[in-house]
Image (cartoon, rainbow, N blue to C red):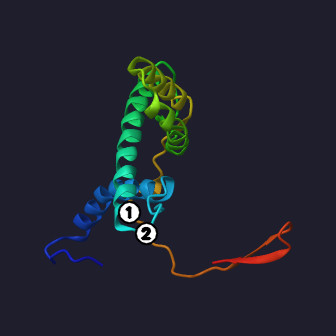
């Protein structure tokens, strides 16, 4: 379903969808990996502060990831890998969040820059292959069937239903 004019063919809409997919992946990172929707207060000012702080942190992480991925690309040219290699974004976000405050409060610019480079080198140790799956070239239609699983946690001694 789309609100585009009828003049667009199905193939054109499919191409637009795949161009939009990169944006959706960024929303996913903000929402799920960086906990973008978690705010520290209910006041409007708190929400605005949290929003802009998350945007700044996201941009800083993306900058470090971009630099790290370039370094990894140069390093992996020496080796033969079956798939292209990239930085593990989940680990990079966690490491950045863990070290960011210490970087921020460091008064000496030289030491701060050195710590940032050390962080980048540490992030570059965690790499993943980038696989092009067959499903990425076309849309896969899944059924709309809802499956309910019963999961039992022995420690909790009660059943939890996951839908």
Q: Which mark is residue 57?
A: none
Q: Residue at x 48, y 37 (%)?
A: 100
Q: Residues within 10 Å of mark 1 (few under 14, many from 20)?
A: some
On the image, numbered disc 1 is attached to which residue?
A: 47
Instruction: Pick the quarter of the image with the N terminus.
Output: bottom left
Q: Nearer the viewer, residue 52 or 31?
A: 52
Q: Earlier in the sequence, mark 1 or mark 2?
A: 2
Q: Residue furthest bottom?
A: 145
Q: Residues within 10 Å of mark 2 (few under 14, many from 20)?
A: few
The reply to whether residue 137 is visible in this rendering is: no
Q: Nearer the viewer, residue 70 or 34?
A: 34
Residue 93 image point, x, y percent? 50, 43
Are the residues at dot 1 and dot 2 in contact (C-beta closer than 8 Å)?
Answer: yes
Residue 37 image point, x, y percent? 45, 63
Q: Residue at x 35, y 46 (%)?
A: 56
Q: Nearer the viewer, residue 154 or 10?
A: 154
**SS at badge 1:** helix
On the image, numbered disc 2 is attached to which residue?
A: 42
User: Could you tell me how far apart the alpha carbons at marks 1 and 2 are, in whole angstroms?
Assistant: 7 Å
């Amino acid at each position: 379903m789309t609100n585009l004019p009828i003049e667009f063919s199905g193939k054109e809409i499919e191409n637009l969808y795949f161009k939009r997919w990169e944006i959706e992946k960024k929303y996913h990172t903000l929402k799920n990996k960086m906990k973008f929707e978690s705010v520290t207060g209910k006041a409007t000012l708190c929400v605005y502060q949290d929003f802009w702080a998350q945007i700044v942190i996201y941009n800083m992480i993306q900058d470090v990831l971009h630099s790290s991925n370039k370094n990894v690309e140069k390093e992996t040219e020496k080796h033969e890998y079956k798939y292209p290699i990239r930085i593990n974004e989940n680990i990079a976000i966690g490491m950045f969040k863990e070290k960011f405050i210490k970087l921020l409060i460091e008064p000496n610019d030289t030491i701060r820059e050195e710590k940032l480079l050390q962080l980048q080198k540490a992030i570059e140790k965690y790499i993943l292959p980038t696989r092009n799956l067959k499903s990425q070239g076309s849309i896969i239609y899944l059924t709309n069937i809802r499956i309910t699983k019963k999961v039992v946690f022995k420690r909790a001694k009660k059943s939890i239903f996951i839908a």
